[in-house]
Image (cartoon, rainbow, N blue to C red):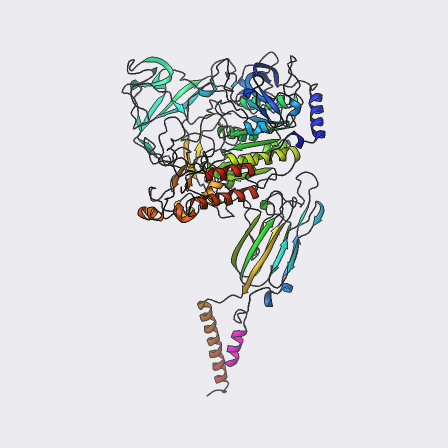
Amino acid sequence: MIINRGDVPSAIRAGAMALGLALCTYPAHARITRIVIDTATSPAFGGQSFGTAGQYETLSGRAFGELDPADPHNAIIQDISLAPRNANSRVEYMATFFVVKPIDMSRSSHVLWEDVPNRGGRITIGTFDRNNGDIGLSAGWQGDNVGGTQQVFPNTTRDFVVVPVAKNPDGSAITGMSLGRIYNVSGPASQAPLIYTNPTPYPAATLDTSKAQLITRTHESMTGEVTGEQVVPSSDWAWARCSATNPFPGTPDATQVCLRNGFDPGLIYTVVFPVKDPYVLGIGFAAFRDLGSFFKYATSDDVGTPNPLAGGVVASIARGSSQSGNFLREYIQLGFTQDEAGRKVHDASWPTIAGRRLIMNVRFATPDAVLHLYQAGSEGPMWWTHWPDTARALPAAGILDRCTANNSCPKIVETFGAAEFWDLHMSPNLVGTGADQDIPLTRNIRRYYIPSTPHGGGSGGFTTTPAAIPSGSGTNWGQCTFAANPVPHTETRNALTVGLRKWVLNNVPMVPSRYPTLIGGNLVAPTKEAMGFPTIPGLPADAPSGLINPLFDYDFGPRFNVMDVSGIVDNVPPVIRRILPSVVPRVDGDGNELGGVPVVLRDAPLGTYMGWNITAAGVFKGNVCSFTGGMIPFATTREERLATGDPRLSLQERYGTHDGYVQAVRNAAANAVAQGFLLQSDADAMISAAQASNVLQ
Amino acid sequence: MKAVVFALFALPGFAAPAAADFSGPVAPATWTVTNTGILTGGSPTLGSATFSTTQLVLTGGNSISPSGDTPGCAGASFQTLGPCQLQVTRNLPGTYSFSWSYLSSDDSGPAGDPFGVIVDSNRIQLSDPGGASAQSGTRTFAANSSFGWFINCTDCIGGSATSTISQFSFATPVPEPETYALMLAGVMALATRRRRRRREQGILP
C-alpha cells in the first residue's frame, strides 16, 4: 500500500506550516546559522515523475553551525570545553548535507527521512520513498577526516562534518594513545594501521618508534587468547612509506608502518602509538540534531537564505543502518533528541542492523570500529528501557533515559537479523548482560527480528545456484567458507516503512513487535546442542559452537565513562576482564531460525541460512567471518543427500516439483502479507520470481 | 487392621480422583475468580472468566489511557507483570494438564497482556511477548498447594487478551514408593503398639 500526501489530514498540514512560519521568528539559539547550496539539480533523476509528488530535485550543500558549550544539550560532548570558540563564545562546525525533495513541495507527503550517512556515504532516498512523496536529508556527522569522511572539496558524493580540534587550556596539544591493526598482508610495502576498513584517524605524534609498540601474533582466538606474541624491536620498523623500490627505512610518514623485513601474511600486527590533537567528534551528534531541526522548523538562516523545506515537514524520521544505526542509538542515549530550543527533533527513529554503541564521544575516538578485538561499543546500557546491568554490576539505565526525562523520545523501530546476534553483540539488547531475562520494551518501541539473515539482508531471489563465497567484512579480513546468505531484508523493510509512516502521520500503531525471547524458548546459548543445530556435511562437527563474537567486558581505564561510552581511554589496548553470556535464536531441523517475522525464503527454504560464516584462510582462519552470513544449500534429490549423510530433506522430498516449490513460496508470501510483514506488490513479485527460477527445473 | 487399611485409602491422595474436564474436584464452582490491582484508566473493563464443562475462557482487563501511553493500572508498566490481572485459582494439589490458545487484541501485541499459570503462588508466563498475536500450547504442571491461570494486562491499555483453556484434566498426586513405604511402616508401628497395649491389657493372649 502506498501512502501519499492525501493521507495527511489537511488540518495537520496547515498546522505544521503555520507552526513553521511562527518559528521563523524564534529567537536565535546556538544552531545552524547559515546554509550554502553548492549544487542544485532540478529536475533530478532524469526528470522522472514519482507517484503523486511529481518530479524531484536534489540540493547539495553545507551548513554552518555553532554550539554553546555550556548548554546542557551540548555539555555531554567530550572535550567541547576544550574546543576553540568564536567571538560569541560558541564552538563552530560545518556539516555537509544533501536534500532530495519534490520540486513542488505542496505535492510532498511532508515526511522527512533524515538519513545517517554510513562512513561518509551519502544517502539518497530510493524510489520507494520518492513514490510516497517523501523528502530525504542526508546529514553529515562523522568528522574523523579519514577514508570516506576525508574532507575533500568540492564535495559531490559524501557527507561529513568538519569539527574543531581540542587543545589544552594553555593552548598546547592534547596527547594520548591509539591502536591500529594490520593483518593478512605481505611484502615490503608499508601499510596503514586500520580500524575496520579505514586507516586510524590520527597519525603518529612522533616518528620515534621507541615511543610506540608494535607486536605480532600468529593467532587470536574468538575468546581473545593470543598465540605467538612477539614485540618487534623499534629498530626493525619505522613510521615511513616504503616499497620494494623504496625499501626500509623508506620515506618518513606518520600514517604508515614500514618493516625492515616486510610483512608476514601469517602474522597479526598491532601497533599502539602516541597521537595528538583529538577531533571533538561528539559535535557530530549535535550537527545531526541541528540539521534535522533546521530543515524541520526553520524558514531561513541568519542571513536570510531560505530553508528549502520551510513549512513543509509534518513528521521527521531518523534512519540509519549498521554503523549509522549505532550512531542513532548513541545519539538518543546521550540526549540529542531535543534541540537547544527544547524542541523534539525526530518523531521516529529507525536504527537497523544495529545493536551496539558508536565510539564517537571519546577522546581520540574511532567511529569506524565494529567490535573487532579491543574495540569498544558494548559498554553501558545496550537496551532501550531502564534495566540493571547485572553481570557488570553497573547502575540501571536505558538508551531512552534522557529523552524520557525531557519528553523528547521518538517512536522507535528496530530491525535486525541473525548476523547481529552472532557478530555484533545483539544479545544484551534483548536480555541484558546476564542473558537471563527478557527486557521489556515500551509501547513506543517496535522490534522486528528478520530471522536467518546476514548483515543488512541478502540479495534475495530464488535459485539453486549458490551465490559467490563472500569475504569477511573489513579490509583484508579474508574469504569465508560458505556461499553468501541470500535472505533479504528489503521486502520486510518496505512493509514496515508503510506502517511506520502511518504511525508517525496518523498515530496508527505499527504491527506489533516480533522477536525471539527467552520466555518463548527461542533464545538459547550459542551452542550446537542448545540451538538444536543439525549435523550438516561440510561443517565442523561442533559448528556453530564457539563461533559467536564474544561479549567482552573491557576495562578501558579510570577516565572512561562506561555508561555513556565517553571520556578518555587510558588502557590501550583495554584489559579483558571476562566474557559475558550471550544468547542466539534457536533453529529448526534444517538449521534455520525460529521466531521473528515471517520471511518468504526462510519459510520456503532452499538451504540452511546462517547469520555466521567461517573464515577460510589467513590469520583468522576458523574464526567467525566478520559479520558475514552464509548458506548451505539442500541436496536436490534424496539419493544425493543420503550419499553425503545430509539429514536435511532434499528439494524433491520437500517440494516434489518446481510447481510445488512455487506453491510453497505462494503460501509463505500469503502468510507474511496476512501478518503485515509483506506488501502484496512485493509478494506478487516474489511469486513471479519463484516461477521464473531454476528451482527443480 | 481392617479399620487401619480403610483409613489409609481414605487419606487424601489415595482415593486418586481425577477429572477429564472441569468436573468433580475441579468443577467450575471450586475455582476462585479474582481481579487484582486497580484499573485507573477510562472506562475500565475488568477481566472475566467463563467456564463450561469442557473449557474456560479468560479475558483480561483493559481501560483507556488517561493520556497518551499513561498506564491504566496503578503502578504498572508495559510488558512487565504488574498488579492488575485476572486470575482463576484452585487450592488443590495435583497435576493439571491443559491446552491453551491465546489471542491478543492489544495494538502493541502479546507483550502487553501476558498469559500464564500460577503454580503454588508463582507466576509462570506462557505467552511469548515477542510472538504472534495468536499463540497456543499444551502444558502439564504439578502443584503442591494451588494452581491457576492469569492474564496480566500490564499497563492495561491498548486492548485486552483472551485465553481459552481446553483439553483440561486433573489428577491428585500419586505418592512415590518411598511414601508408601513410610506410611506402611507407620501403620505397622501403630498396629504393633496397639497389639502390645491390648496384650498388656490382657485382651490378647
x then y, percent, for residue A480: 36, 33
Residue A389 shows up from this direction: no
- In the foreground, B48 or B82: B48
| Residue A153 highlighted magenta (yes or no) | no
Q: Quadrant of residue A189?
A: top left
Horizontal placement of A330 versus A607: left or right? right
x then y, percent, for residue B53: 61, 64
Q: Is residue A584 above or below residue A107?
A: below
x then y, percent, for residue A59: 57, 18
User: Which part of the image, by quadrant, shows the N terminus of chain A?
Assistant: top right
Q: Is residue B146 above or below residue A502?
A: below
| Residue B16 highlighted magenta (yes or no) | yes
User: Which residue occupies 54% across, 48% down?
Assistant: B128
User: Which residue occupies 47% across, 31% down?
Assistant: A377
Q: Quadrant of residue A466?
A: top left
User: Which part of the image, by quadrant, shows the C terminus of chain A?
Assistant: top left
Horizontal placement of A668 versus A206: left or right? right
Residue A259 shows up from this direction: yes
- In the foreground, B44 or A336: B44
- In the foreground, A151 or A390: A151
- In the foreground, A106 or A260: A106
x then y, percent, for residue A149: 48, 20
The magenta span reads B1-19
